[in-house]
Structure formats: structure tokens, C-alpha cells
């Protein structure tokens, strides 16, 4: 079946091309781009001058299944992803039971084949995410498993983390870490600073992240094994990663829309909806994250989509769960807080959302519009203004810090393997 998306503006960051015309898809692949009229297509959609971009790739989501299906499932999470323009996502292993065994992963991989986007998985680094016993990485020799992490918790033991890096390189798996030194996380509420003091909380020291980032960079240098730093939130972390890349240390890193859009002061108005781990930091940290995304120090934008039930997010910051949903607001948050501010260009934004994640994950046919690539496409209206209403989300959960905020930039259609997975 031949499908045409006509009257579009086209951006392919892998080639630097920006054009106007028609994008042609056939049998789930990109057939090409043309300015000529096409009459033999089975389906034709009018893009009305909007931008067609390679489908977004999120390296960090929590779909809660198994064990937390009341918060999110593979099916509802994939629908939320499609609504946000994401055609590939990587699921974290902190489920119940944890994804540390072939049987759990194999079941997920089989079930994911009929969903609204491409699901990939990270297995756990340690058995049961306990930080003590390294999983046999032979468990992860199956299509769809791209890496390992204990995300939700850090790998605190340096010897185990070093072994993981060595095993990851041996088995061709990306090794990622949630960088927070647990002894400095204190009450694990919000950033340790003026807002925490005002609310009578101890907070989480920024050193918790920075010390573990520093440790993992040293381990990567010592072993010459790649490491991926998850959800960077600190200015000093950005600076250390920048220096490490200049030294040639094999490191990649991500940050989230909430960490480049909101500071710790959002907790005063958003309460537990603005509580996550690592927490929102200072204005200086937020600006450093933006700069890191602009200059390539931070490779990609990942949502850390973490659904929670209403009962998990109470007025008690100490008792409330960490985490926010992000798939359906990520693009608009990026347009509003990065593109509109001049922090990055549209081309760089697409690199962060599509091209670079594909490179890190080794997905040769994604994140690009080259002929023969997967027909994963998102049509976006850069000028559409809208107000976030979580009641409209396709995710099961509503825990967004952007509730009621006015944003610019809207995903209008998403094509996954050449077929519509979402249309507004």
C-alpha cells in the first residue's frame, strides 16, 4: 500500500535537508520525497504545510506492566507514546517482578508486536534490582533487548557497576545508570535548597547526582566501556559530561522535558505533581541542561514517563511517589522552552528526539527519512497553541507537572510503519 503525506515541510536531520512537497511511504518504508503530484497512491493525507519529522524515540519510559497495570500497561503506554509523536520507546525494568529474566522479557516482546509503537526493553543490571547480584547477561540475548539498567535505583556498588560495563560491552548492550548516591538522598523529597527549607524538608543534595556521575565517568574511562547517564539534572553533571566527551570517554547522556522546563520553585504551585527523582533543580541547573542539549553534551531528550495513580500523589510530599508522565507533553514542552527561547534549532531538536537516540540504540532504519528507512513519521504543527489538560491524555495516569499550562507545538498525526497510529 502506497501512502502519501502531501503539502508538508520536510526536515531530515541526518542529511540536513529542508524541503516542501510530498513524502511517500510504501510497505512500511520510506519510498522517497517528491515535489511532483502523485495520483496512484492508496491513501493521501494533506499536511497543510505542517512539518513532517522522523518519529520520536524515547530511551526512557516506565509502562508499569507487570505489577502496576492500574497505572499503565504496554497498550495504554504505547497509545500515549503515539499521541506524543513517539514511534519507538525503551521500557525500564523496574516492574513487579523486575525484568531480570528471559521469561518476563520474552512475554513482553511477544505482546508488544501489535501495539501502537515499537517497544524495546532494558533488562535489570542486578537481580531484582537489589544492587547485589549481577544478572547473567545471557538472559538478554533476544531481539528487542537493547540494554541494561536498574533505573528507579542507582547501582551503588562500584565493583558491580564496573562488571556491568565490561559485560555490557561484551554482549553489545547499552549500560545505563540512575546516578544518585543514596546516602545523600536523605528524605528523597525535592531538591535540597531554599524551597525545601521553606517547606521544612531536608531534600536531596545535588551532590547525590554529581558524585555518581563522576564515578561512572571514571569507570567508563578506566574500562573504555560505554556508559549512558540517565535524566541529567545538574549543571555540574553537564560540565563533567562535557569534559569527559572532550577527553574521549565513551559516554552518552539524556535529560527530560521537566528538567529543562521547570525549576524547584514549581513544587510550590504544583506540589507532588512536580516531585520526581532526580528532583527539579535551580534555574542555573535548568539553563545548563538547555545548553547541554544545544551543544551536544546531552545527546537526547527522554521523558522518564512514570505513571502513578491519584492516590500515589498526595499533598504530603514525603509520602508521595516520585515520577511524572511525559510522553504527551514532551514535544510541546521542548518547542515552548527550547525552540521558542532560541536555546536550540528545530534541526537540533529533531536530533535530540529522533536521530541521536536511534544512533545510540543502533537503530539504523529509524530517526531518518532516507530511502528504505522505517516509515515512522510525525506530523507537527509548530504554531498550534494549547493548554494541557490531563483528562485528555491517552495514558492511564494524570500526574503531569504541566497541568493547565499553555504550550506551543502540537503533534497532529503519527505514522508507525507507514500506518496511522494516532490522529488528532
Image (tube, rainbow, N blue to C red):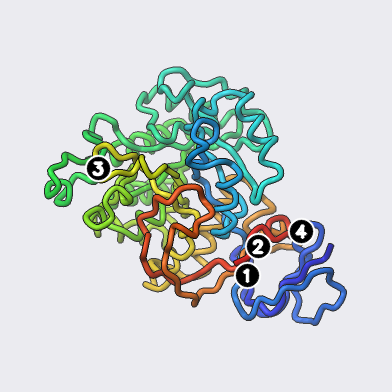
Discs 2, 3 touching: Cβ within 8 Å: no
Q: Which element carries disc 3, helix, strand or loop?
A: loop
Q: Helix or strand or loop: what does disc 2 sit on?
A: strand
Query: Would you say 68 lies left or right of 242 here?
Result: right
Q: Mark 2 points at which residue?
A: 377
- Residue shown at 32% from the left, 38% from the top: 214
Task: Estimate how packed mark 2 is, as few (under 14), some (14 to 19) or many (20 or more) residues with alpha carbons within 10 Å.
Answer: many
**170 above or below 90?**
above
Quadrant that contains the N terminus: bottom right
What whole-number distance in Å separates the C-alpha atoms at marks 2 and 3?
39 Å
Determine the residue positioned at 60% across, 76% down. Answer: 50
Q: Does the CB distance between marks 1 and 2 fall below 8 Å? A: yes
- Residue at mark 4: 29
Judged by depth in the image, the label closer to the viewer, 3 or 1, is 3
Sequence-first disc among 1 and 4: 4
Q: Residue 43 at x, y = what percent?
A: 79, 69
First in sequence: mark 3 or mark 1? 1
Which mark, residue 178?
none
Q: Residue at position x 64%, y 80% from top? A: 48
Question: Residue 317, which numbered label?
Answer: 3
Amino acid at each position: 500500500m502506497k501512502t502519501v503525506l502531501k503539502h508538508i515541510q520536510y526536515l531530515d536531520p541526518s542529511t540536513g535537508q529542508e524541503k516542501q512537497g510530498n513524502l511517500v511511504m510504501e510497505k512500511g518504508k520510506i519510498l522517497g520525497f517528491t515535489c511532483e503530484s502523485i495520483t496512484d497512491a492508496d491513501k493521501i493525507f494533506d499536511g497543510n504545510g505542517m512539518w513532517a519529522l522522523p518519529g520520536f524515540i524515547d530511551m526512557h519510559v516506565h509502562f508499569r506492566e507487570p505489577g502496576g497495570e492500574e497505572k499503565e500497561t504496554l497498550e495504554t503506554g504505547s497509545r500515549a507514546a503515539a499521541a506524543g509523536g513517539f514511534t519507538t520507546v525503551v521500557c525500564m525494568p523496574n516492574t513487579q517482578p523486575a525484568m531480570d529474566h528471559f521469561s518476563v522479557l520474552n512475554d513482553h516482546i511477544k505482546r508488544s508486536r501489535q501495539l501502537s509503537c515499537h517497544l524495546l526493553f532494558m533488562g535489570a543490571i542486578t537481580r531484582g534490582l537489589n544492587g547485589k547480584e549481577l544478572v547473567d547477561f545471557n538472559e538478554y540475548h533476544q531481539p528487542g533487548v537493547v540494554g541494561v539498567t536498574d533505573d528507579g535505583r542507582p547501582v551503588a556498588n562500584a565493583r558491580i557497576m564496573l562488571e556491568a560495563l565490561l559485560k555490557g560491552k561484551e554482549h553489545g548492550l547499552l549500560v545505563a545508570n540512575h546516578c544518585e548516591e543514596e546516602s545523600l538522598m536523605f528524605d528523597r523529597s525535592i531538591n535540597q535548597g531554599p524551597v525545601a527549607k521553606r517547606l521544612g524538608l531536608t531534600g536531596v543534595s545535588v551532590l547525590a547526582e554529581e558524585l555518581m556521575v563522576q564515578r561512572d565517568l571514571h569507570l567508563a574511562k578506566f574500562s573504555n566501556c560505554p556508559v549512558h547517564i540517565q535524566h541529567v539534572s545538574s549543571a555540574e553533571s553537564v560540565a563533567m559530561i562535557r569534559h569527559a566527551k572532550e577527553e574521549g570517554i565513551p559516554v552518552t547522556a539524556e535529560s527530560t522535558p521537566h528538567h529543562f522546563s521547570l525549576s524547584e520553585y514549581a513544587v510550590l504551585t504544583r506540589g507532588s505533581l512536580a516531585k520526581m527523582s532526580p528532583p527539579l533543580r535551580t534555574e542555573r541547573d535548568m539553563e545548563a541542561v538547555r545548553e547541554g542539549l544545544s551543544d551536544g553534551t546531552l545527546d537526547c531528550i527522554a521523558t522518564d514517563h512514570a505513571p502513578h495513580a491519584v492516590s500515589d500523589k498526595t499533598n504530603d510530599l514525603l509520602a508521595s511517589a516520585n515520577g511524572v508522565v511525559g510522553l504527551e507533553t514532551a514535544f510541546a514542552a521542548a518547542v515552548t522552552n527550547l525552540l521558542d527561547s532560541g536555546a536550540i534549532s528545530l534541526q537540533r531538536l529533531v536530533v535530540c528526539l529522533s536521530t541521536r537516540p536511534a544512533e545510540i540504540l543502533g537503530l539504523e532504519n529509524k530517526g531518518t527519512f532516507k530511502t528504505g528507512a522505517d516509515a515512522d513519521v510525525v506530523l507537527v504543527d509548530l504554531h498550534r497553541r494549547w493548554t494541557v489538560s490531563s483528562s485528555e491524555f491517552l495514558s492511564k495516569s494524570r500526574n503531569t507537572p504541566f497541568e493547565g499550562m499553555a504550550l506551543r507545538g502540537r503533534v497532529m498525526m503519527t505514522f508507525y510503519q507507514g500506518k496511522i497510529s494516532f490522529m488528532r
